[in-house]
Image (cartoon, grey):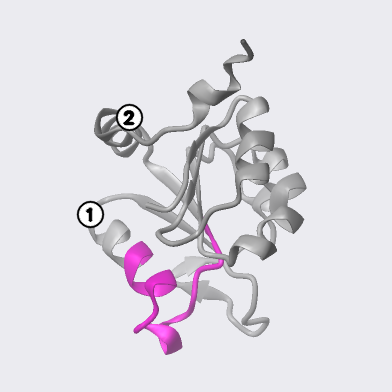
Amino acid sequence: MDGWRDKLVDSPEGIEAILRECRRIAVLGIKTEAQRDRPAFYVPEYMARAGYDIVPVPVYFPDAREIFGRPIYRKLADVPQPVDMVNIFRRSHDIPQHVPDILAAHPKVVWIQTGITNDAVAETLARAGIKIVQDR
């Protein structure tokens, strides 16, 4: 049996370990303060207040220069290393276009937010040795 499925994390213990071990989180699809009522803004904002080092990687908002007072990056691969986690706020069908960029960033974990899954992407990333959390 191929061990890539071991990289799919859904147990409470696995989730707790990820949250304990990951400190630097690149947020792909983060929103700006103008969209503060959207989960893609207030979830990373909460994480920043909880002490995580949030690196904004918006997909839109070409005029934005920073979010939470932090400089933004247009590509995950441009974020200075290390990146412990990539937290994705994108629709399921939009995630595959980001796979090469995710792989170039070398995160330990990719966390796909609540209500969002893409099993093909999860398998690709897991086969590359990246832990995956989906729909959380």
Mark 2 residue type: Gly
Front tag of 2 and 1:
2
Residue denoted by label 1: 50
| Crowding at mark 1 (Cα within 10 Å: few <14, some 14-19, many 20+) | few
Residue 79 drawn at (x, y percent): 62, 50
Q: Earlier in the sequence, mark 2 or mark 1?
A: 2
* Displayed quadrant of residue 16: top left
Indicate the amino acid at tag 1. Ala
- Asked if one can make out residue 68 in the rendered structure from this viewpoint, the answer is no
Q: Quadrant of the N terminus?
A: top right
Q: Which residue is mark 2?
A: 14
**Horizontal placement of 2 versus 19: left or right?**
right
Q: Mark 2 falls on what kind of element?
A: helix
- Give the percent coordinates (x, y) of residue 58: 59, 69
Depth order, front residue of 34/6: 6
| Drawn side of residue 107 relative to residue 33, left or right | right
Is residue 53 part of the magenta span, yes or no? no
> Mark 2: few, some, or many residues within 10 Å (few <14, many ≥20)?
some
